[in-house]
């Protein structure tokens, strides 16, 4: 069976984890702090905070910014449920808008959805392709007069916050700049199936404009994500520094050094090995499917190479089929021992959100993209023979269904 996205675990990672275990630091410690420093350097961001998940990162930023019941947060209908769930956790209202044919949020749709209750815009870099951040950043400035600040953080910013769900896009570029430095705050995922994995984990990339001090914000978020405690374990272990205080009722979201050890190995080889390998797989898929009129290959490069995907998900679409036909194609692919997936069932189609009154009919491009999408296997150890097996399985299944 060809797997969909197995993690890349080799001896380097095993040795790094073993070293972390032997060091005595298995919770937040020097490796986590080093990964934060290196992530900030890699992305060109002022500061990075590593946590136990991207979801925790998104929610903690919403709470820091003061998002509460009565507020609205705009996000694409085409995303994973985590993007919307964190808004619900804060008591606020998710305002879904439609996307473009490239799966990313429509800036025009955002503009039409903004009200005096809008506090945050949450674009999602689908499959690793960065959104149009110039347009989104310009939009929040254009609508600054609409913004009604209710907290000190909101008054200091003076406009809606742009909080990018960049879970997929570590290493992607937008007009020559790395994701993580493209807007106010971006959040990466290091989940097991992500390009850069720490098994579970994520990073909050801080890029707030003046008068915010991103280093001060980092220190504040460290407290918020560790019970409201003003010292972490590393600081408390310094001689005579055991006494701590709880300055607020915080959360428990910190990353451990065991996970950071994996991340440090992955980051060191990310640009030279991981992204190159994934780009090669995308190129082979794109060339193979370019021979079939029914295949719609995903966009993974724009602006003459200045905007590039992180090559996270190869989201193939089949032209001229229904959702039911897509599902049958997937069944036939699995029968040939090839694992595929769908990214994602749009949030307005899920039971909880349908129960809140959301209707996928209001997001026609989102539904069209979803109904024809099949995510193909992409992983480090794929070779040309495996890729050809995937292409043959997809082609055979499509031809059986479409005739």
Image (tube, grey):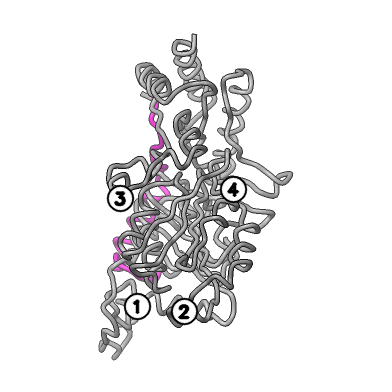
Q: Residue at x 43, y 80 (%)?
A: 151
Q: Earlier in the sequence, mark 2 or mark 3?
A: 2
Single out the mark in the foreground, 2 or 4. 2
Residue 400 counted in the magenta span? no
Task: Determine whether the residue tagged by mark 4 lies in a helix, strand or loop.
Answer: helix
Instruction: State how far apart marks 4 and 1 are (Cα).
Output: 35 Å
Instruction: State how far apart marks 2 and 4 are (Cα).
Output: 39 Å
Mark 1: give few (<14), some (14-19) or many (20+) Cα within 10 Å.
many
- Give whichever of 284, 149 is nearer the camera: 149
Q: Residue at x 66, y 48 (%)?
A: 307
Q: Is residue 325 above or below residue 158?
A: above
Task: Determine whether the residue tagged by mark 1 lies in a helix, strand or loop.
Answer: helix
Q: Earlier in the sequence, mark 3 or mark 4?
A: 4
Expressed as whole percent of the image width and height from the top left, the position of residue 210 reads: 59, 79
- Give whichever of 99, 340 is nearer the camera: 99
**CB atoms of marks 2 and 3 within 8 Å:** no
- Give whichever of 231, 237 is nearer the camera: 231
Single out the mark in the foreground, 2 or 1. 2
Expressed as whole percent of the image width and height from the top left, the position of residue 188 reads: 46, 56
Q: Residue at x 25, y 89 (%)?
A: 243
Q: Which residue is mark 3?
A: 356
- Residue 223 marker: 1
Q: Is residue 376 visible?
A: no
**CB atoms of marks 2 and 1 within 8 Å:** no
């Amino acid at each position: 069976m060809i797997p969909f996205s197995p993690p890349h675990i080799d001896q380097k990672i095993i040795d790094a984890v073993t070293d972390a275990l032997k060091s005595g630091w298995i919770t937040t410690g020097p490796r986590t702090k080093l990964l934060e420093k290196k992530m900030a350097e890699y992305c060109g961001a002022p500061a990075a905070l590593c946590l136990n998940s991207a979801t925790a990162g998104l929610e903690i930023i919403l709470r820091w910014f003061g998002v509460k019941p009565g507020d609205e947060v705009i996000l694409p209908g085409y995303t994973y449920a985590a993007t919307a769930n964190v808004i619900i956790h804060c008591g606020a209202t998710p305002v879904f808008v439609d996307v473009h044919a490239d799966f990313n949020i429509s800036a025009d749709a955002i503009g039409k959805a903004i009200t005096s209750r809008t506090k945050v815009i949450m674009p999602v870099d689908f499959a690793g392709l960065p959104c149009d951040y110039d347009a989104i950043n310009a939009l929040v400035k254009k609508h600054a007069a609409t913004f009604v600040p209710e907290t000190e953080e909101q008054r200091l910013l003076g406009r809606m916050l742009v909080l990018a769900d960049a879970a997929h896009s570590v290493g992607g570029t937008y007009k020559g700049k790395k994701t993580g430095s493209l807007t106010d705050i971006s959040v990466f995922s290091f989940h097991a199936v992500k390009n850069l994995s720490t098994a579970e984990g994520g990073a909050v990339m801080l890029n707030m404009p003046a008068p915010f001090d991103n280093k001060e914000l980092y220190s504040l978020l460290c407290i918020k994500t560790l019970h409201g405690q003003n010292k972490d374990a590393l600081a408390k272990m310094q001689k005579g520094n055991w006494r701590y205080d709880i300055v607020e009722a915080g959360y428990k979201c910190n990353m451990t050094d065991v996970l950071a050890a994996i991340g440090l190995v992955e980051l060191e080889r990310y640009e030279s090995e991981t992204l190159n390998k994934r780009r090669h797989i995308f190129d082979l898929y794109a060339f193979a499917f370019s021979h079939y009129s029914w295949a719609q290959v995903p966009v993974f490069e724009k602006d003459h190479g200045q905007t590039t995907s992180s090559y996270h998900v190869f989201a193939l679409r089949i032209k001229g089929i229904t959702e039911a036909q897509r599902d049958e194609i997937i069944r036939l692919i699995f029968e040939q021992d090839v694992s595929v997936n769908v990214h994602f069932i749009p949030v307005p189609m899920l039971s909880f959100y349908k129960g809140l009154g959301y209707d996928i009919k209001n997001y026609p491009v989102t539904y069209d993209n979803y109904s024809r999408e099949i995510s193909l296997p992409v992983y480090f150890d794929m070779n040309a023979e495996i890729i050809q097996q995937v292409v043959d399985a997809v082609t055979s299944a499509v031809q059986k269904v479409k005739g």
